[in-house]
Amino acid sequence: MSEIESPEIVRLGDEVEVVIDKVANGGFCIARHNGQVVFVRHGIPGERVRIEITEISKKFLRADVIEVLEASDHRVSAPCDYAGVCGGCDWQHVDLAYQRELKSEVVREQLGHLGGITHVNGKPLAEFEVVPLSFDETGLRWRTRNRYSRIGDSAVGMKIPRSHSVVEINDCLIAVEGSVALAQEKVHLGRGDISTAQSSTGQHVVVDKQGGPWLDEEVGERSWRIHAGSFWQVHRNAPKVFVETVRRMSALKSGEKALDLYAGAGLFAASLAGDVTERGEVVAVESVIDAMRDARRSCSDLPQIDLITADVNKWITQIDEDFAVVILDPPRAGAGLEVITEIDRIATRSIVYVACEPSALGRDAKYLSEAGWSMTQLVGLDAFPMTGHVECIALFERF
């Protein structure tokens, strides 16, 4: 009887040759080596590549592409000198249109596998496509909020993926112009990371320890005065497009009631207030005190908005009234079963879900489906070009 050969033992730093199979959530692609799943950075589906093993676990390996042996037609020269080194981008080596195709595949896989979704927008899920925020999108100079690691008192940098190590940079091509230079001006002051923020009105500041200074943001015909450190959508075009999409899906009418959960500084609440008019009501709930203070300051002219500072998970179990529409923009982990169960109890017509993580949307879509809700509309927006992230806005209606 012949001796059975043992599988090849893989060690950190080993170099092996693989063929990239498909894209995975999170800016990776999937390959296999000796039957084991490998999450690979810097590859493109269909490519034959040489990879270096960077992490080993019982269930999978992680690796980086170090040589492309057979390149995809979608591979391009990365515009940034730090692409493939710093952790700011995942897809600079991929042409922009194909990046959106990869993100479309990720959304379809996550919603199909985790959410059981088969059809949306009146079509099979397989036809769903992520679209750009604007027709003139270049994939560069879009990020208005940025954070850099301080290197001593002379330079700034970005962290290397899955590491505490930092690579020094003198520019970041997805950040708005001048962001790195602004951070470098302040590198000798204080300690810790340096964050910058640019408003739609052109203010460009370093965020201080108190979360300030103030910024003036404009979306449509409304203005917000917020702390520079408060949450705000990072793509310069995102607030406008998100608001238009949420308003269209909500289809609120004068006199109706809406609930805005995880309301932040009131971006959606203030925009929806005009739809319900003073005859209606928008209840906005947010746990971050500074964000709610910003909302109160910016929405003081709208008596139909009721701003509540509270933890959504606790507050929603205590409310005993119905809302025609519930809008929610939860953290990356999603809303979760308990919150979804309460939303099912109080939403009468529709739910508009804003999601920055397709896997979380998939899980929550499953909970909503089990409660009798169907995802009837879905918009996928490439609000984070060059990265593995994607924004989805979904409409759920009772079936």
Image (cartoon, grey):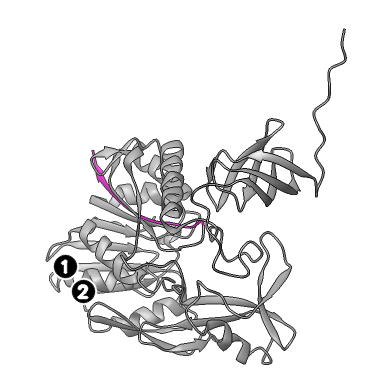
Residue shown at the point (47%, 57%) measured from the top left: 95
Q: Is residue 209 visible from the viewing direction of this image?
A: no
Three-letter amino acid code of the residue under disc 2 = Gln
Residue shown at the point (35%, 43%) measured from the top left: 368
Residue shown at the point (16%, 62%) measured from the top left: 256
| The one of 134 and 186 positioned closer to us in this rendering | 134
Q: Which mark is residue 276?
A: 1
Which quadrant does the N terminus fall into?
Answer: top right
For disc 2, the marked residue is: 304
> Mark 2: which secondary structure?
loop
Q: x, y percentage for residue 87?
A: 62, 64
Residues in magenta?
Answer: 388-399
Quadrant in which residue 274 is drawn: bottom left
Q: Is residue 291 visible from the viewing direction of this image?
A: yes
Q: Is residue 85 above or below residue 156?
A: above
Q: Is residue 242 left or right of residue 101?
A: left
Q: x, y percentage for residue 218?
A: 31, 81
Q: Are marks 2 and 1 in contact (CB under 8 Å)?
A: yes
Q: Is residue 391 magenta?
A: yes
Number of marks drawn: 2
Q: Is residue 251 left or right of residue 390?
A: left
Q: Is residue 142 above or below residue 325?
A: below
Q: Is residue 218 magenta?
A: no
Which quadrant does the C terminus fall into?
Answer: top left
Distance from the alpha carbon under mark 2 to that under mark 1: 8 Å
Mark 2 or mark 1, which has the lower sequence index?
1
